[in-house]
Amino acid sequence: MAASDARARRFVRILVAVGVSGLSVELAFVAFVLRTGAWGTTTSDRLLSEIALDAVLYGSLFGLAIFARLAPSIGFPPPRFYPDWWSHRMSAKLFRILPALLAPPVILQATFLALGLSTILETAWGLLHWYPIYGILIASLVDAQTVFQWRTVSGQGT
């Protein structure tokens, strides 16, 4: 098995797990809101827009997973993480900093909930929209970390 095929399989497994779990939670969220009518008279309109957003978001996620599986070397060649003048340590620092840059929306949602500025339903709705974004980020970081270790071990990074 080629290294690119192993990377693509790992990438696909993470994307499929994120997609299936995200769709399951979205289905439970839609069923809860539909059953309780939590948004009042705008419930059906908001749920239709939520379903349309989910179809586009998770459809593209599953499309990316299928593309990664069918064409691992074409779709995901080993990326170049840094120019020639960068050091390996700087690239490793960027991998540690990137998740911290995307943490503020989650922290803000939790803070608004704790301060009473949003309801549990609004917080869940906001976090559900960030879930696939974080899933794709995690899949990309796992894939990139594998490539980065491979490049540094083999000496091809310089």
Image: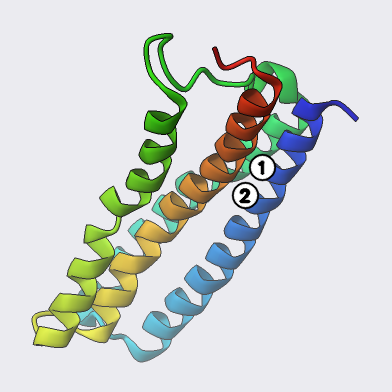
Residue 63 visible from this viewpoint: no
Quadrant the N terminus occupies: top right
Q: Which mark is residue 56?
A: none
Q: Give the residue at mark 2.
A: 15
Give SS at disc 1: helix
| Residue pictured at 31% horizontal, 86% vertical | 37
Residue density around tag 1, few if under 14, some if 14–19, many if 20 or more, within 10 Å: many
Identify the residue at horizontal 30%, vertical 53% (top origin): 100
Mark 2 lies on a secondary structure that is helix
Above or below, 135 relative to 74: below
Which residue is farthest bottom? Answer: 36
Q: Pick out the residue farthest to the right.
A: 1
> Which residue is tagged 1?
11
Most foreground residue, 3 or 58: 3
Decide: is 75 above or below 65: above
x then y, percent, for residue 18: 58, 58
Q: What percent of the width, then of the height, locates residue 146?
A: 64, 37
